[in-house]
């Protein structure tokens, strides 16, 4: 059995090896649940494999299958079992998706194009870098050249701000409610030798930040909004639900956007539908297809929209 999977992974990785090497990409998806007998995702972060099992009643795996996968990873990717980190992902909601799993603080760094990021594979469900947004980050880098100010909402470890700063944007503001991720963001800024006066990470509820920013008339050239599907916390007046709350979130953010600015909105909610009529902007482009990296076979891993206030659309930007 493990030969089938090992061969599949080897061939898959051969196809993308030039893309990875020529772009200095050290974190990528090596296997994306393409074979129904092996219901996992295998992501490579430097010397480690991070294996996510999506466990529900239909999709849990036996010890035997687990051993087969371990062996296939060893054979095809030359990663020993000691460097394979397994995560059992149930459908998480609200706070539980960000809770701590451990305290090993086993941090290391990986490179991606011009940027570097701190990764922690053991202590949380997520790793510090969302790989499905690699091309979105490249788009942000392209949009950031010649721009002054970026606002990154629900910024997590601020990877969008890091790539924008490395592309030359002067000021970035990253907003996330979590203390852990705000600190992680600052570590990423330092790792990339960013000036932490011009590039700031604020621990705040996005909705409170938006109220303040509106009152103070702060303006941005580029706004990125990548919210969770659902979020709830003591700091929030009411729970956030992306499908219900996206019009208010996008429209309030548009008030902070300069007239020739660009807003990117993204969500991992698979059933998400955006109704253009509810958005107070001129142009809404669904750029989902262009932002799915070639190492992902799930074309519905995220949805992404580029929103502008004017007819203007940066057509010279090819992702
Ligand atoms: C999907 S992650 C964002 C991923 C990030 N944009 C990236 O590409 O790395 C969602 C983030 O939203 C944060 N969050 C959830 N609700 C929030 C709120 N009301 N205000 C601020 N941050 C929030 C979480 O702490 C988490 O870091």
Image: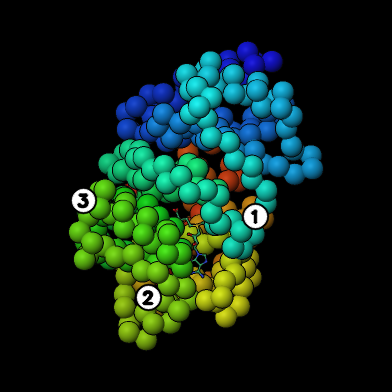
- Classify residue 10 as left or right of residue 271: left
Q: Nearer the viewer, residue 36 or 307?
A: 36
Could you tell me which residue is drawn at 57 percent across and 53 percent down? 268
Residue 304 point in image, percent of width and height = 51, 54
Could you tell me which residue is drawn at 43 percent across and 35 percent down? 45
Badge 3, how many Cα within 10 Å: few under 14, some, many 20+? few
Badge 2, how many Cα within 10 Å: few under 14, some, many 20+? many
Point out which mark residue 92 bears: 1
Could you tell me which residue is drawn at 55 percent across and 60 percent down? 228
User: In this rendering, is residue 31 above or below 289?
Assistant: above
SS for callout 2:
loop
Q: Mark 2 sits on what residue?
A: 256
Residue 311 visible somewhere in the drawing: no
Residue extending farthest to the right is 57
Residue 269, quarter of the rendered image: bottom right
SS for callout 3:
loop
Residue 238 point in image, percent of width and height = 61, 78
Badge 1, how many Cα within 10 Å: few under 14, some, many 20+? few
User: In this rendering, is residue 213 above or below 272?
Assistant: below
Residue 192 visible somewhere in the drawing: yes
Q: Mark 3 sits on what residue?
A: 193
Q: Nearer the viewer, residue 7 or 182?
A: 182
User: In this rendering, is residue 233 above or below 97?
Assistant: below
Position of the N terminus by quadrant:
top right
* Mark closer to the chain start, 1 or 3: 1
């Amino acid at each position: 059995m493990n030969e089938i999977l090992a061969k599949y992974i080897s061939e898959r990785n051969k196809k993308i090896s030039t893309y990875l090497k020529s772009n200095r990409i050290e974190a990528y998806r090596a296997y994306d649940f393409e074979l129904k007998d092996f219901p996992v995702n295998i992501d490579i972060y430097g010397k480690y494999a991070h294996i996510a099992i999506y466990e529900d009643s239909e999709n849990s795996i036996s010890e035997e299958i687990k051993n087969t996968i371990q062996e296939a990873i060893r054979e095809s990717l030359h990663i020993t079992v000691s460097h394979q980190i397994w995560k059992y992902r149930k459908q998480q909601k609200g706070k539980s998706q960000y809770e701590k799993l451990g305290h090993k603080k086993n941090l290391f760094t990986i490179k991606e194009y011009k940027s570097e990021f701190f990764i922690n594979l053991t202590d949380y469900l997520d790793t510090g870098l969302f790989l499905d947004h690699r091309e979105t980050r490249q788009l942000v880098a392209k949009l950031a050249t010649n721009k002054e100010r970026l606002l990154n909402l629900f910024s997590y470890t601020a990877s969008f701000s890091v790539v924008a700063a490395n592309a030359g944007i002067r000021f970035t503001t990253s907003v996330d409610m979590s203390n852990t991720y705000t600190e992680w963001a600052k570590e990423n800024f330092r790792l990339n030798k960013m000036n932490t006066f011009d590039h700031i990470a604020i621990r705040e509820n996005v909705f409170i930040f938006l109220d303040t920013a509106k009152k103070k008339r702060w303006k941005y050239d580029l706004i990125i909004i990548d919210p969770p599907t659902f979020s709830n916390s003591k700091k929030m007046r009411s729970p956030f639900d992306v499908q219900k709350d996206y019009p208010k979130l996008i429209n309030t953010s548009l008030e902070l956007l300069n007239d020739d600015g660009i807003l990117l909105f993204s969500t991992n909610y698979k059933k998400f539908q955006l109704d253009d009529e509810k958005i107070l902007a001129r142009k809404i482009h669904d750029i989902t297809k262009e932002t799915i990296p070639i190492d992902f076979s799930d074309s519905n891993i995220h949805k992404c929209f580029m929103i502008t206030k004017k007819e203007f659309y940066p057509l010279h930007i090819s992702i």
